[in-house]
Image (cartoon, helix red, strand yellow):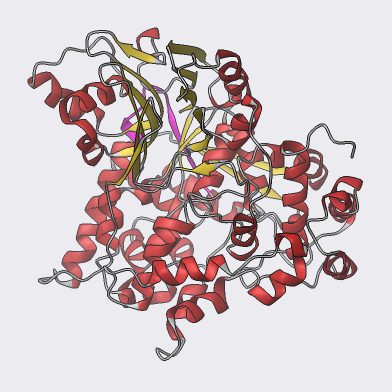
Amino acid sequence: MCGICGELRFDGQAADLTALGRMMEAMQRRGPDHGGSFSDGPMAFGHRRLAIIDLSESSDQPMHDAELKLALVFNGTLYNYRELRRELAGMGYHFFSEGDTEVILKAYHAWGEACLERFDGMFAFALWDQHRHTLFLARDRFGIKPLYLTRNGQRLRFASSLPALLAGGDVERDLDPAGLQFQFTLHGSVPAPHTILKEVQKLPPATSLTLDGRGNVQERTYWRLTAQRPAAPLSETGQLEAIREKLQAAVARQHLAADVPVGVLLSGGLDSSLLVALLAEQGHADIPTFSVGFQDQPEEKGDEFHYSELVARRFGSRHHEYLIPDAEVLENLPEAIAAMAEPMFSQDNVAFYLLAREVKKEVKVVLSGQGADEVFGGYFWYPLMHAEPDSLPPLERFARHYFDRRHPEYLELIAPEYATADHASALLASRLSEPGADTFLDQVQRLDVTTLIVDDPVKRVDNMTMAWGLEARVPFLDQELVEAALRLAPELRLREGGKYPLKHIARGLLPDEIIDRPKGYFPTPALKYLRGGFLQFIQETLNSRACRERGLYQRPYVERLLAEPLSHFTPLHGNKLWHLAVLEAWLQQHVDPLRDR
């Protein structure tokens, strides 16, 4: 929906409005419809708006309620804002706008920090209480909307992207060894609060911070996900029907919470196809749908148009297909990498970036199927982990099928001055062992949904759509749906190769060919099987003066991968050479942009 930023001073000085302006400018593409700022002594807010709900000036931000003495910047959407508004109006609150932003102000005034537990949506926001002189920051349960922080003894700054914080200035750009080890172990995921920079953190999902003018801070986790069977479970039929009802409700809420048309990113897979089917079942016609494809490689087909066309014909959607040639992908690679708030390794990022560029020409909001595989067990590695003997420690069962590099290989990759302990293993062992999960697979899927998914694919969807001023919503990450799904027995989620509850719902709605097909992925094969201009881009990046002088990678490891660009893949089928190049290209664009390359 937007880009937000701000500064709170702890040293008695006025907030730096020049730095605020630079951060706002860096996020202009996230919010092309309006820009505004608000300051109150040591605190200042900046906002870039993508107008989705209440398109009038009444919902421009920053929003200041002079009567309540509260100011707000908000990125995201509250899907239940109408219900909350009615409740608050019944309590005597009056409203000057028709959108969801003002609902947050009134809800905070009415219920304080407990307002978060009432919100159904995706959000990151900052609220300034002029009575108490406190700043309240919060992020949604699944981290769908980002919030980056940097702090020193004089001030705290926040923004919707890491590059925006860097644009503000006065941020050291030293790399964080722990963040790097996460990056190269967990498929590009760097769990909050870490990033790859020492001085920049992420607010964790389902978390709030309250700060005062002296820098005192209180952190609170307001929601935790469990994955346990209830004491008196419903029958299997009853459980599946409950999933159907919650998914139908999530799709309806997320589609209706907009004053502009809403489309669907239709890959042709089960998840996005089911979104179209449920919208049609709810009476929506002429749904805008969008698919992207790329050139084939000898090893892999580059599009799934056959399947998306089946769905489009069945439901009469207003379908758009974009076949993007490799030359255009290559031309846009640097721009796509620059759009990443943090370096992301999945090839899907570039596909999303190029698809969003075209979709924004038609609509401002889309529904997307991200999250369904994590919630309902759709990835190929879940059955592999599940089949491992129970005698293996949970971390080992997970790591052997997920880690991009085990720690000995990571130490071959990274220069000695950045070498560190195995932070990824330590963190994941701790997260897997937390109470509230009945089985190993429950532990894994809870970890995926609450930790790993936040950086890939959720971050991908936010970054690459918002880079074009397009808002993507993810119904499969509806709170009630996720909680219901993780109450199911793992064997039910994994039945029929995974995602059985969704297949059950889809049977009779979608063509069997969609339901029973092998799982596909958003294919961008030229970025997996590196040849021609793509390999040349990799070679030039990794052999550049900047890369060599940075000294982040050990050259024997780089040379080994460059000698065999089609031979080094991770357990998740990522190209290790691509990983190295993406991080280096991102660093050249954001961390040392003035350096002679």
Q: Quadrant of residue 94?
A: top left
Residue closer to the observer: 543 or 299: 543
Residue closer to the observer: 315 or 23: 23
Determine if the magenta segment contains residue 156.
no
The quarter in which the C terminus is drawn is: top right
Question: On screen, 577 above or below 95?
Answer: below
Q: Quadrant of residue 217?
A: top left
Residue closer to the observer: 380 or 388: 388
Determine if the magenta segment contains residue 258.
yes
Point out the stretch of residues depicted in magenta.
255-266
The quarter in which the N terminus is drawn is: top left
Q: Position of residue 571 (x, y in %)?
A: 62, 73
Task: Name which residue lies at 53% across and 22% down.
Answer: 31
Q: Position of residue 416 (x, y in %)?
A: 76, 65
Task: Name which residue lies at 47% across and 61% down.
Answer: 514
Question: On screen, 492 above or below 552?
Answer: below
Left or right for 239, reference 38: left
Residue closer to the observer: 108 or 92: 108
Q: Examine the rendering and report whether any part of residue 296 can be seen.
A: no
Task: Name which residue lies at 40% across and 8% down.
Answer: 57
Q: Examine the rendering and report whether any part of residue 203 can be seen.
A: yes
Q: Position of residue 472 (x, y in %)?
A: 47, 38
